[in-house]
Amino acid sequence: MSDSPVLLKSLRSHFLGGQDAAVHGLPVLSKPVVGNAAPRPIDMNGSYCAGQLYAQEYRLARPRHPYPVLLWHGGGMTGAQWESTPDGRQGWLWRLLQAGYDVFVADAPERGRASWTMFPQIYGSAPIFRSKEEAWHLFRIGPADGYAARRAHPAQQFPLEAFDTFAKQFVPRWLGHEAMALDGYRRLLDLAGPCIVIGHSQGGGYATQLAHEYSGSIRALVAVEPTGTPAAAAASLPPQLLVWADHFGASAAWQRYRAQTDAYWRALRQAGQRADVLDLPAAGIAGNSHFCMLDRNSDRIAELIVDWLARLD
């Protein structure tokens, strides 16, 4: 893809959904809150906003397509995964803007600029965190025993020299917050109106679930290696594209995730729905990781997705 400029009409931020929560019974602290300052009282008892979703809205001066694209990130990640690659190339956000689409980039509740709140007073438990070692094999960059030596899977497309930079965008993740996240994404769908959703991993699973509720608003859905797909297909759903990358043989977890999603895609087809599959290795594109939007050939995969969307126009 070219490095052609993009002319924006507007750039807005939205905080959507969430609810009020109250905290009582905490001790009042006395601490300095800035350097070289005297202590002051810190009373954290009171009312809070919790569970909101953040979205950044990019509107083109001259969009070439009627529906905006909503970008939904994966688990333990934020919308930053769409903005640029860890080795400094343009991300899918920019490529979609260049292709003429308005774009909304979401940070799900508890992630990124949506923020999180105190626990266990409001969130019932502590978050989990992702280590570099887990990311190395779970994201199918290399084998489980390959992190220390940075030994990758054959023909790996992920920019290995930028792995440490990639790991800097990992954020805490709370388990059991699916209902909170789905409510935030519902509010985003209400705001955006008719739209296209591209969801990755956990975000892809949320998108496939909400397509059942928003079949009139979601005009097309691209699920990039989704997890948590529904158990059954509805009678009327938007066209959907499933994207699979490479190196599943080395990950039992991903073999299970894929089996669940492939079963759902078969159910979609049996229900008469359009459910296409872009299996990258089967298409002659080898070596991609779980994060194909960050891989060295990310532009090529973006082109394939944009081409699929164009055929729906």
Image (spheres, helix red, strand yellow):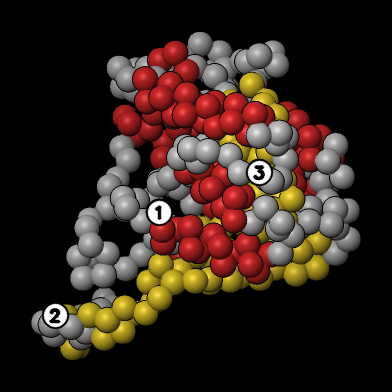
Which residue is under mark 3?
235
Instruction: Pick the quarter of the image with the N terminus.
Output: top right
| Mark 3: secondary structure | loop
Q: CA distance from mark 1 to mark 2?
A: 28 Å
Q: Which residue is mark 2?
A: 26
Q: Nearer the viewer, mark 3 or mark 1?
A: 3
Q: Nearer the viewer, mark 1 or mark 2?
A: 1
Residue 154 location, x and y as percent? 51, 11
Numbered badge on residue 140: none
Location of residue 48 in the rendering, given as x and y in whole percent from the top left corner = 34, 79
Q: What residue is shown at x 47% (from left), y 29% (from top)?
A: 260
Residue flagged by tag 2: what amino acid is it? Leu
Say if mark 3 contacts mark 2, CB within 8 Å. no
Choose between 241 and 154: the one closer to the eye. 241
Query: Which residue appears at 56% of the width and 62% of the height?
Result: 186
**Earlier residue among tags 1 and 2:** 2
Check whether the beta carbons of the residues at disc 1 and disc 2 lie within 8 A of each other. Answer: no
Residue displayed at 46% across by 69% down = 52
Q: Nearer the N terminus, badge 3 or badge 1?
A: 1
Location of mark 1 (residue): 178
- Residue 272 found in image quarter: top right
Whether residue 242 can be seen here: no
SS category of the residue bearing label 1: helix
Disc 3 marks a residue whose amino acid type is: Ala
Real-space Cα separation, disc 3 to disc 2, in angstroms: 51 Å
Q: Amino acid at mark 1?
A: Glu
Q: In the rendered view, would you say 192 is above or below 151?
A: below
